[in-house]
Structures are given as C-alpha cells and as structure tokens.
Image (spheres, rainbow, N blue to C red):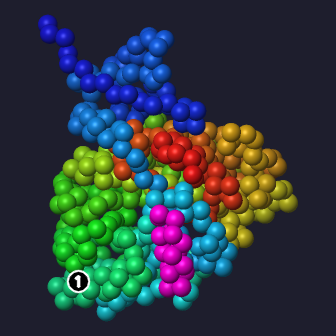
Amino acid sequence: MKSPKIIFLVLQVSAVSSFSVAHAATLFHLDLHAIHQPRNADMQVPLLYLTPNTPKYAAHVAHALSVGLQRMLFMGYYPDWLGSTFPPERIDYRRFDWIDFAFAVPEANATLSWDDPGAPDLLDRLVSGAHSNGCKVKLSIGGWTGSKHQFKNIVRHFSSVMATDHLRESFVNNVVAAYQTYQLDGIEIDWEYPGHSGSSANKPRADDTANFLEFLRSLRAALPAEAKITAAVEPTPFVDDKGLPLKDVSDFAEVLDWILIMNYDLWGSSSHPGPNAPLYDACGNSTQPAGSALGSYTAWTQASFPAYKLVLGLPSYGYISSSSARFLRTRSKATKKQHKQSTSFKISSGDGDSDGQVQFRDLISQGALSPLHNNLYESAHGFERLWDFCSGTPYLQSSQSKQVITFDDPMSLGMKATFAKEVGMLGVNLFDIHGDTNDWNLTDAIRNSLGLHET
C-alpha cells in the first residue's frame, strides 16, 4: 500500500500564546492520533503533519505558508463617544496601521449623519494625527446602536436605502463625498445585518444581501482605486433570500478589500455567563459553533472568502454578570436574573451598573486585576482568575460579590492574534482603542503575537 501524502504546517510558538499540539488539533479539527511531532532537538518550532483524511484545509494552509513572511496589519476602532474622555491626541498612532472611526449613520433619505454632534471635528483631528504618523483611517458607517449614552438605533435605514437604484446611487454619492471631505483612506460598512435583524429597530428584507452586493459594486466604481472598502460582519456569511448562510460569497470577496469578523458579544451579562470572544469550541458543545475565531474562520473560508482577506475582531472589554457560577456556559443563552446587592467589593460597568460591559483598563483601575510582570495580570480583591478551556478565554469570579467577569487579557488576545497569523489572515482589529491601558499592554501583546516590531 502506498504511503499517504502529507502536508506540513509550521506553527510558531510564542511565550504569550503558548500554543500546543492539542491547541493545533483543536484549530484544525484534527484527531490527535493523526498528528506526529518529530523529535528534533534542533527544531525551534514544532512540525505538525496533517494526513489526507483531515478536513479540507490544505489550500488555506498552503496560502498561510505562502504569505507567512508578509507583514500583518493591526487596526483599532475609535468611537465618537470618546471625545471628552479619550481625545484623538492620546492615541499612539505609531502602533496602528489603520483606525476605524465609528460611526456615521445612514438616514432614510440616503444621507449620512452622526450620532454625536462633535463627531466631524473628532474625525478631522483623528485623520490629521493618523496621517502625520503613517496611519490610515476608515470611516465606519452603521454599527449596532450608536453612542452607548444615547442608544439610538442607527442601522434601521440600511435595508431601505439599499432597496432601490435611486437610493443606492444617492447613498454611494454621499459616502464618496464623506471620503473626500475628510480625506479618508477607506470606508467600512457595518450593517448589522443584511437579511435578518440585529437591533430590534431593523426592518430586514429578503433581498438585502443581493442589494448590498450591488451597492458595494457601485461604491467600488465610484471611489478612487486606492480607497479600501471593507465590511464588518458576523461570524457566519451573509444570508440568502431564505435567511440561510450563503455557501459561496466569492462575489463579495471580489469587491471588498477585507472583512472584519466581529468575534465578540457572543455572550453578554447573564446569570449563566458564557465567553465574550471564544477562540474555539474545544468542548464541542456550543450552540453557536461558528461563534469563535476558529468557527468564523471556517465558516467564511468554506464559503470561498479567502483567509488573506479576513480580519479578526478582538475586544478590549468584557462583561460583568451577577452570578455565582464557577464555570462558563456555552450551550445556550440564559435570561438575566436579578440578585440582591452585596456589601462586598464589586466591579461596575462604564455606566455604573453591576452588570454590563467593562473595559480592560477599568478592571485594573477598579482593583479586580493587578499587574505582575511580562504583561501578565493576577486577580485581586476577592476575585479569582479562572480559565475556560472550552473557549480559550479567562474569567474572574468572586463568591463574595457574586460576580463573574468574562474578558480578554494580553494572554488570550495574544492567542487569538497568533491564530489569525497562523491561518493566513490579513490582520486583527481591536474594539476599541480606549479599553487598553495607558501603556498599551493589550495592543503590544497583540502586536508581538503578530510578529510586528516594537514601535
């Protein structure tokens, strides 16, 4: 019997990511018995042999190897509600290749507005600072609910402005005008979501995805050739007119320079909390199997969107849950229950609530995390740092305050960045910039894992 052909993949190992053979097996859905690690004392990285009976990753692995020497891109979002607390002048632009300014708002008449009156001035300052430091800027149009302080449903008009040739043309013209007015380098469309509801105010249509493609083609023709056009997307591909994920999105890949996979907000605050941004579904029991870095990569590449046009979204925030749970839940979302207030040490969200989003910097300033060395952090003030092996993410648990905080730190973000690098993605994007520490600890951990040089 002929010996089977083998494909080999070199996985780089960093101190931050600590990737193992078991991790690699999870990443590529391999049986550990199909993996052989050669014993060679001279090797600086492990060599993994993938046999032909493994899933069809050969093309993606080959491309990952072919672009392995190319520089990856690091990006970040700057939301317009940060103007008073984190002005653009505080950004170290040298650490970023691209910054997305969020958000401009589509109106019913296909014009663009802002969810914050100070946004145009902020954008001008952001572009000036970025361009002075070799960083590029895109305008992100859409989003989920706009400013967290106003909770205005800003994406409700996408379906209507995409539905007719006249409105699509007007929208294209207005987007191009914004590109020129603010001297931008690109445009991102963050429609949540074509063909099905995100925010309850959305009114999706069965032909949303087809109309979106026509809009993107028109926008591509209207913008300068050097302008980048991107889209922020969910972990699964765009849906067809029946609401099912498309099996082939190669037409979108032809017109988009890249897509950002929003691999966060998989679970929010809950009495049965789950991971915010899973790396993978290692336990195989998630009811959102595509809701992870690995799952979304698999879903999009299997639908013929090339890995080198994928950007992995990373969160700088987590979620506080009023809960006594010791383990994270991944099988289903649960209804949030109210718990009696405790006099114990508690962490609060940005709005002062005992549940909700919390920035990584606030976990430190409020005392739940304490810095150690080498960009590592330990838990403090009654919190215990635990690790969810099913998702590859950390979480904090306090029996005294009855709180669970699902979050990402330099280690877990470094792991996801390493994953993006090893499977041949274009880069990663942090939402958002201000959630990092003043010393840019999250940013630097990500950059190191991407193989980017010190600034």
- Residue 35 magenta-drawn? no
Q: Residue at x 48, y 21 (%)?
A: 44
- x, y (%) of residue 261? 39, 57
Asked whether, in this view, residue 176 is left or right of residue 284, the answer is left
Which residue is at the front of the view, 135 or 211?
Answer: 135
Q: What secondary structure predominates along the stretch shown in magenta?
A: helix
Which residue is at the front of the view, 421 or 318?
Answer: 421
Answer whether residue 65 is visible to the viewer in this image: yes
The outermost residue toward the bottom is: 109
The outermost residue toward the top is: 1
Q: Amino acid at mark 1?
A: Arg
In the displayed structure, would residue 106 be above or below residue 329? below
- x, y (%) of residue 164? 19, 85
- Residue 127 magenta-drawn? yes
Q: Residue at x 24, y 69 (%)?
A: 225
* Segment tinted magenta in the rendering: 119-135
Disc 1, SS = helix
- x, y (%) of residue 354? 71, 64
In the displayed structure, would residue 310 be above or below residue 137? above
- Count of residue discs: 1
The outermost residue toward the front is: 132
